[in-house]
Amino acid sequence: MGFIFSQLFFSLSVTYSFCLIFNVRGKASIFSSIGGAMSWMSYLIGLHYGWSDGFNYLFATMLIALLSEIMARVLKTPVTTLLIAALIPLAPGGGVYYTLYYLIQKMYHESFLKAVQTCVIAAAMALGIIIVSTLFKIYTNVLHKIKHPHQ
């Protein structure tokens, strides 16, 4: 149990550090840091239930994209300022590292497998962002048409 809390603490800390690097200040950095911890928590939940890598990353990214869309409206800030930093704990940097490591070691099969796994993760994350941003845009357009029917 303590191991999970330490992971959540470090994912929050890493996200906050990236907020400082990306010059995200104030409430946006706080909410983005909480989003980073939530993204890692949702990833851990998926691991617990035995979800595949692709679905696990898709679910975690969709959750954070939805949170970022909502908080961006509340804070009146661009979605990307919240979303990019909050996705840092999920970034497949280790996969890229091991792909190149295996390639340099001339372990071509392992390199290929790791590259495919990394691409699946990156594609799942991109798809999660696309799905949520598209659905959110449709929702706001419908809401606008309901409020202003003659425009």
Image: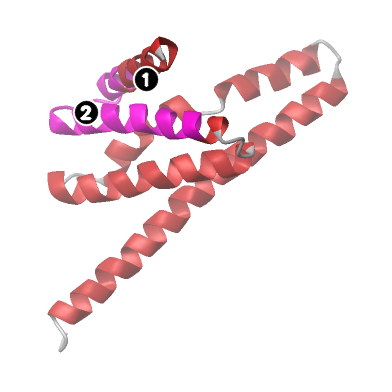
Q: Which numbered circle lies on residue 29? A: 2
x and y, in percent, of residue 23 in the image: 23, 25
x and y, in percent, of residue 119 in the image: 65, 38
Q: Which numbered circle lies on residue 8? A: 1
Which residue is at the front of the view, 53 or 83?
53
Which residue is at the front of the view, 53 or 98?
53
Question: In the shown orientation, is residue 5 left or right of residue 124?
Answer: left
Select label 1 or label 2 by which is in front.
1
- Quadrant where the C terminus is found in the figure: bottom left
Secondary structure under tag 1 reads helix
Residue at screen point 44% across, 49% down: 129
Q: Name the kind of residue labelled 1 in the image.
A: Leu
Secondary structure under tag 2 reads helix
- Taking the magenta stretch, the answer to whether it contains residue 120 is no
Snapshot quadrant of residue 26 = top left
Cα distance in 3D space between marks 1 and 2: 16 Å
Comes first in the chain, label 1 or label 2 = 1
Q: Main secondary structure of the magenta part?
A: helix
- Up-down: is 30 above or below 100? below
Q: Which residues are magenta?
A: 16-45
Residue at screen point 85% across, 17% down: 107
Circle 1 residues within 10 Å: few <14, some 14–19, many ≥20? many
